[in-house]
Image: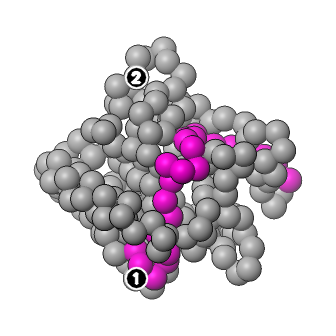
């Protein structure tokens, strides 16, 4: 599995809706002002599937450039992608891996949530998604066990890591270095899934 993309989202404990005091933090100006975002349901399964959201940008199209993942320019989606969810943690400035979707389908455009999934925002609007995969292919790390850091790009030429965009394709030198380490980290969690958040 060599097609990997990193999606930067707000920090939450469970990503199963805004419940029990689990509210999104460090997710940008909109979330700070409104108190919610599409990612609040990223690990709430529905009929055996998971549906994930990332803010793809504030340009008029708000699309994901799936061509950078190998999709034909006219394709609406691409499958077989390893999606890594990262977030800036509430207890510090580090950006850490919070979980992943394996063998995911990534859509170019926002998708409407499945009927009956109850993916609703506080304003009553549907919470869209960009990514889906089987529930069994997903893992969410407990908040107090998240320890795999991803660098943020400083903006200097040649510097790697996640930049201002919430989508990082890890095509730089740092990305090439971090991917093998990340795959080992994922393999370790695969052997201790009983410690993961129950989905």
- Relative side of 128 to 105, left or right: right
Instruction: Point out residue 90 in the picture as x, y percentages from the top left corner.
Output: 49, 80
Mark nearest the camera among 1 and 2 is 2
The residue tagged with tag 2: helix, strand or loop?
A: loop
Question: Is residue 25 within the magenta segment?
Answer: no
- Relative side of 171 to 133, left or right: left
The residue tagged with tag 1: helix, strand or loop?
A: loop
- Relative side of 155 to 90, left or right: left
Residue at image position (51%, 34%) is 105
Residue at image position (31%, 69%) is 148
Q: Which residues are magenta?
A: 124-146
Q: Which residue has dot 2 on it?
A: 71
Residue nearest the observer in this picture, 111 or 104: 104
Residue at image position (34%, 30%) is 68
Residue nearest the observer in this picture, 83 or 136: 136
Image quadrant assignment for residue 159 = bottom left
Above or below — where is 91 with respect to 40? below
Above or below — where is 95 with respect to 181? below
Which of the two labelled residues, at mark 1 and mark 2, occupies the earlier sequence position?
2
């Amino acid at each position: 599995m060599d097609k990997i993309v990193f999606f930067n989202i707000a920090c939450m404990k469970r990503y199963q809706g805004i419940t029990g005091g689990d509210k999104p933090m460090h997710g940008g100006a909109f979330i700070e002002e409104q108190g919610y975002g599409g990612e609040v349901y990223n690990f709430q399964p529905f009929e055996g599937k998971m549906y994930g959201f990332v803010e793809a940008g504030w340009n008029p199209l708000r699309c994901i450039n799936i061509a950078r993942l190998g999709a034909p320019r006219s394709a609406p989606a691409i499958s077989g992608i390893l999606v890594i969810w990262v977030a800036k943690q509430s207890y510090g400035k580090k950006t850490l891996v919070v979980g992943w979707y394996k063998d995911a389908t990534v859509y170019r455009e926002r998708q409407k949530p499945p009927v009956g999934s109850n993916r609703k925002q506080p304003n009553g609007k549907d919470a869209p998604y960009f990514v889906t995969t089987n529930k069994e292919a997903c893992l969410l790390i407990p908040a107090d066990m998240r320890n795999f850091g991803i660098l943020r790009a400083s903006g200097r030429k040649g510097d790697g890591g996640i930049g201002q965009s919430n989508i990082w394709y890890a095509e730089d030198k740092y990305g090439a270095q971090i991917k093998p380490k990340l795959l080992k980290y994922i393999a370790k969690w695969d052997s201790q899934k009983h410690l993961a958040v129950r989905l």
